[in-house]
Amino acid sequence: SRNIISFGLQTMKKREAQSELNKNLKRFGSRHPRVGESHQSLGLFYLFSENYRDAETHFEHAVRIYTNALGIKHPDVASALMFKGLTHLALEKLDDAMACMLRVRRVREDALGRQNGPHPEIGAILNNMACVQYELGDYKRAESLLQEALDLQREVFTTEPDFLKGVSIVLCNIAFLHAKSGSFPKALIELEGALQIRQDILLEHSSRMSEITGNMAHLLAIHQLQHGAVNLDEITEAYITMLRKSKRDN
């Protein structure tokens, strides 16, 4: 029954977004930014519902309309381009995804002004570029981009919640690369940093940090397995319990 309700809600959202697009087309014409906004809304709907082909089409419309109506340096152009790049990533069009993200970086750096120093927004762009490089198999380049993002975030540090969540995401991604290369102690250090941000600064509920604690527990269990332990699943569960208890005690 939950699946039926969820499907019904998704269908309603799609109809509402399509209706809004049709209304804006009639009212403003096909080149107006409001029409671009409607295309982007539909693109996001399809992206989150994993209908990537239709998402790609709507993001392409949004990019074209925004660029012609608002100019290449407008943040709405960069936003639509980034979503288009993420859609390419989901479709495994990796070269196209990287081309979009390089364009986003160039556009936003030009718009924000390089002479004014780094901007927090660029850190998120670098993180997304690193994800594409990882999928392309260039792990060194991916790690380099993540380290560049982290260095930038240190330089422009702020306690704004969205920024801090961005830092935790970069730390988790660096940890993943360290773990993949077998550098488990380094991976644990990065995950500990991400966990500290989420629980000590953002004060998030433990349920929202389960992925981080789960990954930490798994890495600790692998380390024990390498030193003679025999059951990875049991050790992982034991470490998860320990990490959760540590959070409650703190």
Image (tube, rainbow, N blue to C red):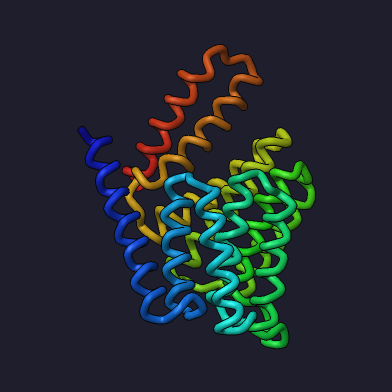
Report the residue at 71% width, 73% height from top. 106
* Res. 146 visible in picture: no
Q: Of 15 and 171, which appears nearest the observer?
A: 15
Looking at the picture, does residue 48 appear above or below residue 16?
above
The x and y percentages for residue 59 are 54, 62
The x and y percentages for residue 49 are 42, 46
Report the residue at 48% width, 75% height from top. 30
The x and y percentages for residue 169 are 54, 54
Q: Image check: 33 left or right of 81? A: left
Report the residue at 64% width, 76% height from top. 108
Outermost residue on the front side: it is 26
Q: Image check: 110 left or right of 172? A: right
Q: Quadrant of the N terminus?
A: top left
The x and y percentages for residue 50 are 47, 44
Looking at the picture, does residue 231 appear above or below residue 114?
above
Report the residue at 48% width, 42% height from top. 212
Q: Image check: 34 left or right of 60? A: left
